[in-house]
Amino acid sequence: MLCWFQMPGSNPFQDPVRFQRRVRPCALVIFGANGDLTKRKLIPALYRLAYERRLPTGFAIVGTSRTPLTHDAYRDQMKEAVQRFSEDTPLDENIWRDFASGLFYEAGDLQDPACYAAIAARLDEIEATRQTGGNVLFYLSTQPSHYGPAIRGLAASGLHRGKGWRRIVVEKPFGVDLSSARALDAELHLAFAEEDVYRIDHYLGKETVQNILAFRFGNGLFEPLWNRRYIRNIQITAAESIGVEGRGRYYQEAGALRDMIQNHLLQIMATVAMEPPAVFEARSVRDERAKLLRSIRLFKPGEAATHAVAGQYGPAKSGGAKLLGFREDECVSPHANTDTYAAVPFFVDNWRRAGVPFYIRTGKRLAKRVTDVAIQYNDAPHSPFEAAGMEDAVLGARPNLLVLRVQPEEGISLRFLSKQPGSGMKLRPVSMDFKYGSSFGVRSPAAYETLLLDALGGDATLYTRQDMVEASWNAVTPILEDWGNRNFDFPNYDAGSWGPAESDAMLARRGDSWRTP
Ligand code: BG6
């Protein structure tokens, strides 16, 4: 029967399965149960889901790592983690007691078959007492060097198959380059089918990153202007004010390009630049993202040396306090050649985006913490107001700017010129602002809450896929290779600044400039 109130058929957000999904009873096994990620993100996110009663009845967690601990000692540690890292969720003793009754711990070495036997026995007991139906999600939250042993251990013990479904979440980094990413993928497929592998990139779970799709494809207003005819450049910034905070050893090997651009920022770029999917479900959305990542123009050998900028922070003073330089970190070599800042101009070779630079930058110990996407539209082709005197301010704060603020102060703002009240025709840039907090008045779920619930519910829409991972490695490999052959004159920016001067020069050569977020 024809219904007059149907949404138009072209709206990609009308997939009833994703939006009305209920998670079936299941258990979660976390490898790396004592690690930083588990304490800071996973357990607080799971507790929040319990607090909102969004976890299925009988839900259980089995944590595993080397340290010998009783179930109760592990529960106490996780309670402390929730108290410390759950920024906006109060610890309710009743909810915690219930949550903790489904929290178990099995100590073991991932190389030792006994570890998997202990997990299997615990899962059998959980299945019998908590009716989880044999459904299990494994989560690799260990050091990446332990991924292989854990996958092989699951396969050898038969834990990768069972009465219910078996899935696996793999934390980033997914490899350290293209060949290691392929090797990891091959290993995963020895045990798991592709539809059961969830490669996580937590940026895709952020509300504001998901909202880029809603903003673009839920409205008819913006998409017609989302192309090379109107856009001058797109700037994607992920600035952090913190340094490497105890992760110096990992970070020294990874660097900013690998740590942030290869994954999070290329995924944001894909979200900003991909074509509309037909429906909002895993395959269509991931196909479009992958297509976009594959159309990123690759740097030719040697090009990155002149076009992309690497930086490393040195010591500085801030309000009387001394900020240590990267090489002064206790886990970092005093000669480390690591990039703690990276700025890269990417181009997309397709009809809609050709010629539009995507300037991507990220860095540690920058002036402030902010992640945003700024779409700089072309100036008006001719201004009839020039004679009447454009305010100088206009030049410093360009109008025709659309900013999608990922974090903090999540929202969207549009800057345009307006007539200043009074006689004459003086123009000033003004902003129209949408703020998540005040507009919806509800808390936005943290990325890990969304993504954990999605994996438990079997929805991979917001997870990456192997072809996306490989396309991203392809895009950064020529830069990594060029940088690997160079000896940088580091440090080249002060802690607390906006990065190296070469980064400004790189944009200036193209007639552009970084905006200050
Ligand atoms: C991680 C990186 O993936 O993302 C970290 O390894 C970085 O170096 C972090 O600090 C940033 O995440 P968020 O959600 O705080 O922006």
Image (cartoon, grey):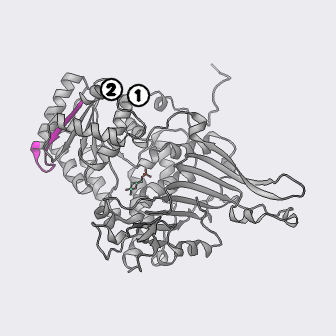
Give me the disc on residue 294: none
Identity of the residue furthest to the top in this view:
1
Residue assigned mark 2: 95
Residue assigned mark 1: 52
Q: Nearer the viewer, mark 2 or mark 1?
A: 2
User: In front: 240, or 470?
Assistant: 240
Q: Earlier in the sequence, mark 2 or mark 1?
A: 1
Residue 189 part of the magenta segment: no
Left/right of residue 509 with respect to residue 115 in the rendered view? right
Q: Is residue 44 visible?
A: yes
Secondary structure, mark 2, is helix
Q: Relative to residue 103, is residue 67 depicted above or below?
A: below
Count up the numbered dots: 2
Give the magenta range. 102-114
- Locate residue 31, reporting x and y percent: 23, 45
Can you tell me which quadrant of the image ligand 1 is in?
bottom left
- Locate residue 221, reporting x and y percent: 70, 44
- Locate residue 68, reporting x and y percent: 12, 44
User: In front: 132, or 471?
Assistant: 132
Q: Residue at x 34, y 42 (%)?
A: 84
User: In front: 186, or 446?
Assistant: 446
Quadrant of the rendered image containing residue 6: top right
* Mark 1 C-beta to ligand 1 under 8 Å: no
Quadrant of the rendered image containing residue 169: top left
Q: Relative to residue 402, is residue 194 depicted above or below?
A: above
Q: Amino acid at mark 1?
A: Glu
- Locate residue 470, reporting x and y percent: 39, 58
Q: Relative to residue 387, is residue 194 depicted above or below?
A: above
Of the 4 image quadrants, the one containing the C terminus is: bottom right
Left/right of residue 376 with respect to residue 450 in the rendered view? right
